[in-house]
Amino acid sequence: MKYMAAEPRKTIVLDMDDMIQQRKLIEFGPDAKQEYVKVYKEKVEDRIKRLADEHPAIMKIKNDEALTEADLSDLELTLNNPELYITEDVLQKVFSQNKGTLVQFIKNILGLYKFPDPKERIKDAFNTYIIENSRHYSADQLNFIRTVQTVFSRKKHIEYTELFEAPFTNFGINAPMPMFTENELNDFINICGVLEKEIYAGLREKNFMFVVIRSKQ
C-alpha cells in the first residue's frame, strides 16, 4: 500500500514488568543522536527561552522586528550546535507540524504564535462542504459526514472502501449508498486527501523510533 512506511519502525523492548507504555524517540544531528521527543522538546524550549533575552535575533523576534539574512544565519548557527542540533526540519517533527519556519517555532515557544489546530482545519473543511452543497442533508446524512470527519481526524487517512465498513455501515442498510451518491462519497475522500497532504504529509510514524517500556505501576 502506498501510504505504508517503506520499512517498519524499530521497537526496543525494556522488560520492567506490568505497565506498558510506548514512547517516541527523535533522531537529530549528523550522528543521529536519539532522545525521547518529550525530553528533547523540553530542552529546546528551555534553550530558546534562555536565549530570548540575550540573542539579538531572538530579541528582534520577541519585539516583532524584521530579521535580516545575517540575523537568520546567526540564529541558525547558534541553534544548530552539537548540544541539540536545532533545525527547522527537526522542529517540524517534534512539534508535529508539516510546515513551519524557524521563526514561527521560536514565536510559538515564546507564546507569541499558535499553530493552526488540525482538528479545527478539518472541521472547517467539512463545514464548508456542507454549506456550499446545494442540497439539504438529513440528520442521518449529517451524522454520517461528521463520522467521516471524526474517523479521518483519528486515523489521518481514509480510503473509499472504508466507507462501506463499520462505523459507516452502522447508519443502516442505506449507508453509504443510496444515502449518498458515488460522487458525494468521492467528494468526502477528496476532502480528506487534500487535508492529509496539507496537514500530515511528512509527519508519519517513519519520522520516529518507538520504544515500548514495560514497568511496574
Image (cartoon, grey):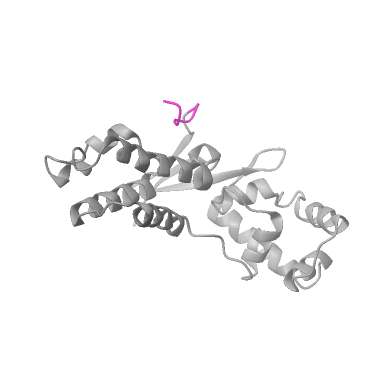
Q: Which residue is drawn at 66% across and 46% down?
A: 89
Q: Which residue is drawn at 64% across and 47% down?
A: 90
Q: Is residue 128 left or right of residue 34?
A: left
Q: Which residue lies furthest to the left in this view?
A: 173
| Number of numbered labels in the structure image | 0
Which residue is at the front of the view, 28 or 216? 28
Identify the image quadrant of the C terminus. Answer: bottom left
Name the chief secondary structure element in magenta: loop
Residue 16: x, y in percent?
Answer: 39, 46
59 to 187, vertically: above or below: below
Q: Which residue lies furthest to the right in this view?
A: 70
Residue 69: x, y in percent?
Answer: 85, 55
Q: Residue at x 60, y 49 (%)?
A: 99
State whether residue 33 appears in this view: yes
Q: In this view, does 214 lie to the left or right of 59?
A: left
Which residue is at the front of the view, 50 or 206? 206
Magenta-drawn stretch contains 49: no
Q: Which residue is drawn at 56% across and 51% down?
A: 97
Magenta residues, start to end: 1-7
Residue 113: x, y in percent?
Answer: 61, 67
Identify the image quadrant of the N terminus. Answer: top left
Residue 53: x, y in percent?
Answer: 77, 73
Q: In this view, does 155 lie to the left or right of 114?
A: left
144 to 55, vertically: above or below: above
